[in-house]
Amino acid sequence: MKRQRDYFYLPLIDAMKSIGVKVNLFALLDHVSQPTITSSSDVVLELKVVDPTYPGLGVAVMFPAGTKTSLPNVKSTGDIISLHCVMMKLHDGEHYCVYDKRCSSFALFEGMGTENLVPYQKSAMYNATEHDTVQLEQMREWSRERISREVSTEHPLKLMRLDPSAIFDLVCKVLHLSKTSSNQQVLYVWDGTDAPPGLQFITSHPDQQSTLPIPLQLEEIPLSKDTLCSFPCVGTILRVFANKNFSGMSKLRGHDKPWVRLCNLTCTMHSSGIWRGDLQPFSKIQILSGQDNCVLDCLRKYDSRINKPDGRYPWMCHLSFSSTTVTDHPTMKCSTLMELLTNSKVENHIKAIVRVVDVYPSEYSYQGQDDIWLTLEDPTARIQALLTGEHAKFFFGGQSAEAVNKKMRTLLGVSDCETEEGIIIMRDPPWSFFCLKSCFWQRNSSGSQYYIVLDTRL
């Protein structure tokens, strides 16, 4: 008798960390697109799958095929699919899976309205195992809970607790509204807390000399300084994008920077490490009074925070953290990057606790002549700061190229793995002290602004 092969199924939230790896999934079908024909006359079907660990936006699964008859024939959304050996990929910050007919296989099961354990369609290579039954029953149970469960509004989430696996409510202040080039509406919201620091996933190919710098913001065009100056200088400002089928934006008309409750919100993290909120078609906006208990709670906690000596410290940064850098100003009070961005002085000197999320050029060896741009972030903003001249020599301290490379990898929190797509680099930088100065390219404050690193040693 032929021995069954066991398959280990990954939750979606873990599969999304396995870029360039073949994974097995057991998930609920949340959306089924119409098959499309590519320029090479191939037929492609896109399915969107969700599970308890990633129930909001879900993950797309791409099925390329020669004909429609070789594609999954899904009866209904809410059905369940088992996928074996699909490749997890990342493109422009979006995670997706690719089905390869040479090695992948699938089985389709009816959803929660039945106890039938037999798939109504499966591919020729699909090899079921005994524990598939447990997976199927658990997915059906979760599907029933998902349909019947009302999202709790008693305890809304805060930005400091952002969770990509949850559908949640957020009490926040709408600071600004804008639109993308495709007419998608964007809300800039704030609740006085700091969102968790992000991870970055970058694909690097062997023939690349240097990767491009990561973006400073999700929006296509940076906000004006006048707009930035109207924002609080402490706390994360989350960009929330409204789905084209979301119909609740009209509730914000006639309100100037209102406090709101965003109901049934989802969030994801862009590959650059920036959080993004999404208003789904089923989301809602509730306008809140300034005397609402949740609003008053946010304001009390914010006032308490900014009046403390460590009020500018990122909340995810322990007071006794070990900085990978030292500065010449140990007693200087810390500021935030938003305070640097919004200061109107011709030259403004601050010390901040930041993470180095990128370096350009991406080679770490310093030759004593080239300018180096560091991308720095804290919970309030992300900027590029110039490391040049005597300040660069002071920063690297005449260390060997090998020592500089090792310390820069530590500063960037780099780990990497090689895949078919190239080298996937993950960055999770530690917190570090940096002294920064804002300058203008022109002598007065009418020109464009830039920032330099000074009085800081690696």
Image: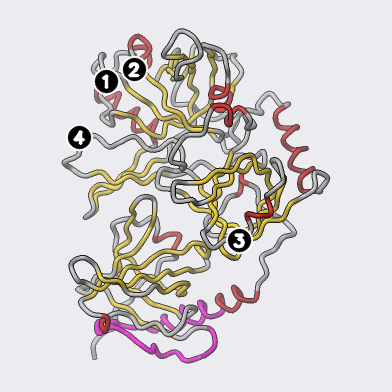
Earlier along the polypeptide chain: callout 1 or callout 3? 3
Q: CA distance from mark 1 to mark 4?
A: 16 Å
Which secondary structure is most common in the magenta stretch?
loop
Question: The residue tagged with tag 1: helix, strand or loop?
Answer: loop
Residue type of the residue flagged with mark 3 = Ser
**Residue nearer the viewer, 432 or 155:** 155
The Cα atoms of the two marked residues, 1 and 3, are separated by: 53 Å
Q: Earlier in the sequence, mark 3 or mark 2?
A: 3
- Mark 2, secondary structure of its residue: helix
Q: Amino acid at mark 2?
A: Phe
**Residue drawn at 64 percent across, 41 percent down:** 190
Q: Which residue is mark 1?
A: 366
* Residue behind mark 2: 396
Mark closest to the chain's N terminus, 2 or 1 = 1
Q: CA distance from mark 3 to mark 4?
A: 46 Å
Asked if residue 372 is among those painted magenta in the image, a careful observer would answer no
Q: Which comes sooner in the sequence, label 4 or label 2? A: 4
- Structural distance between the alpha carbons of marks 4 and 2: 22 Å
